[in-house]
Amino acid sequence: MTVSDTKLPKGQVQTSGAAKKPVVFVDGGSGTTGLGIAERLSAQNDVAVASIADDKRKDPEAKKALMKEVDLVILCLPDDAAKETVKLIDSLGAAAPKVLDASTAFRVAPDWAYGFPELAADQVDKIRNARKVSNPGCYPTGAIALLRPLVDAGLVAADYPITINAVSGYSGGGKTMIASFEDGTAPAFELYGLGFEHKHLPETQLYSHLTRRPIFVPSVGNYRQGMLVSVPLHLDTLPGKPDGAALHAALAKRYVGSKYVSVKPLDDATRNGKLEPEALNETNMLELYVFASEKHRQAVLIARLDNLGKGASGAAVQNMRLMLGIADC
Ligand SMILES: NC(=O)C1=CN([C@@H]2O[C@H](COP(=O)(O)OP(=O)(O)OC[C@H]3O[C@@H](n4cnc5c(N)ncnc54)[C@H](OP(=O)(O)O)[C@@H]3O)[C@@H](O)[C@H]2O)C=CC1
Ligand SMILES: CC(=O)N[C@@H](CCC(=O)OP(=O)(O)O)C(=O)O
């Protein structure tokens, strides 16, 4: 293995001066999410990144030998490969590193912490103390951020018939989808998930505290990255028949002081009734909007994020820093 050109025992990479850098291995580092993490880590200087020879990257024995030397493994693999790799990590027993999984494989597993630090007051501590953390899906990051505070506040009933509409850039589908859009074979825009079984539904329902399965209608457009997740609401069907200001106030109260989640002004006049998905690209930011009509007693909640930022690689780096006990940057 190579650890920033230095081979030293777990947690013992020598940096300039006396400080030691924790060692991280990104498995699947040449995929879309892995490359996004590598890019972010190269801009920071308080972790060392271990790497594996290209011809060994799918070799279980080589991976095991490397993983027992590092402090944290970040998995950026398809679900099945992530499950296999977690088995390898578990087989290391006391030498097992911490693991942060970017796939869908463990997001509702009870022995994994869910890596959305802004989920609840105790979530940061759960992530800090966990050995296994699942990085949230891109769409659930937006949907849960909007819904959980409103369910917790009793403004949306847990059994409300929620519908979630969303659009993503094509990088959300990884290397295969990127290739299909960039070689011109994909359509300009497409709805999908119309079989009602999208892989993000279980985590969205669980962490939003919804008892009724939402309807989720995602779509993908011919642009690389950035997403909008929206939830329409009929205000007279909500408990206490709130107005848009009450929904907005509950979100603003929940995220006050948050570094990465911001609640934009109610009916944000600067948007001219429009919102586009790319404004937060290359950031770890998540913006939440409430647009409401008192005349028609309707509202739309919207989350905007970079599917490769707060929806994947940015969130992974945020979680990695919590898991390694190093300050956010
Ligand atoms: N793209 C996105 O916006 C998001 C993706 N995710 C999740 O992150 C994970 C990675 O997705 P993404 O980066 O988009 O996918 P990509 O298809 O872009 O990359 C996957 C990478 O994993 C590698 N790989 C596959 N199997 C193995 C294995 N057994 N051992 C080592 N490497 C392997 C692939 O290599 P090769 O091509 O050579 O097989 C490829 O480099 C997925 O679970 C995805 O669902 C999560 C949030 C958002
Ligand atoms: C546009 C597109 O295809 N997006 C992907 C979601 C990307 C993502 O978040 O993947 P994870 O489930 O691993 O989190 C999809 O809908 O399957």
Image (cartoon, rainbow, N blue to C red):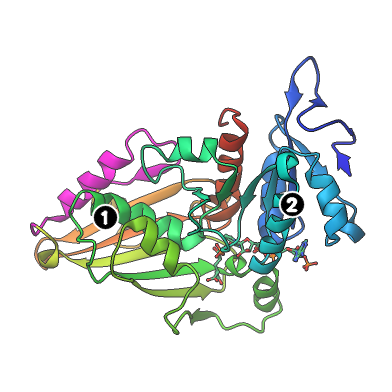
Is the C-beta of the residue carrying label 1 under 8 Å from the nearest atom of ligand 2? no
The local crowd at label 2, few if under 14, some if 14 to 19, many if 20 or more residues have their Cα within 10 Å, is: few
Say what secondary structure mark 1 lies in: strand
Q: Eyeballing the image, is 306 above or below 97?
A: below
- Specify which label sits upstream in the sequence, 1 or 2: 2
Residue drawn at 39 percent across, 49 percent down: 287
Horizontal side of residue 17 vs 86, given as left or right? right
Q: Nearer the viewer, residue 129 or 148?
A: 129
Q: CA distance from mark 1 to mark 2?
A: 47 Å
Residue 91's disc is 2
Q: Quadrant of the N terminus?
A: top right
**In x, y percent, where is residue 245?**
16, 50
* Disc 2, SS: loop
Q: Nearer the viewer, residue 299 or 58?
A: 58
Q: Amino acid at mark 1?
A: Val
Residue at numbered disc 1: 290
Q: Which residues are magenta?
A: 240-265
Q: Is residue 122 above or below residue 163?
A: above
Pinpoint residue 257: horizontal percent, then vertical percent.
36, 33
Q: Is residue 195 above or below residue 109?
A: below
Query: Could you say which is closer to the camera, residue 11 or residue 220?
Result: 11
Q: Residue at x 46, y 42 (%)?
A: 117
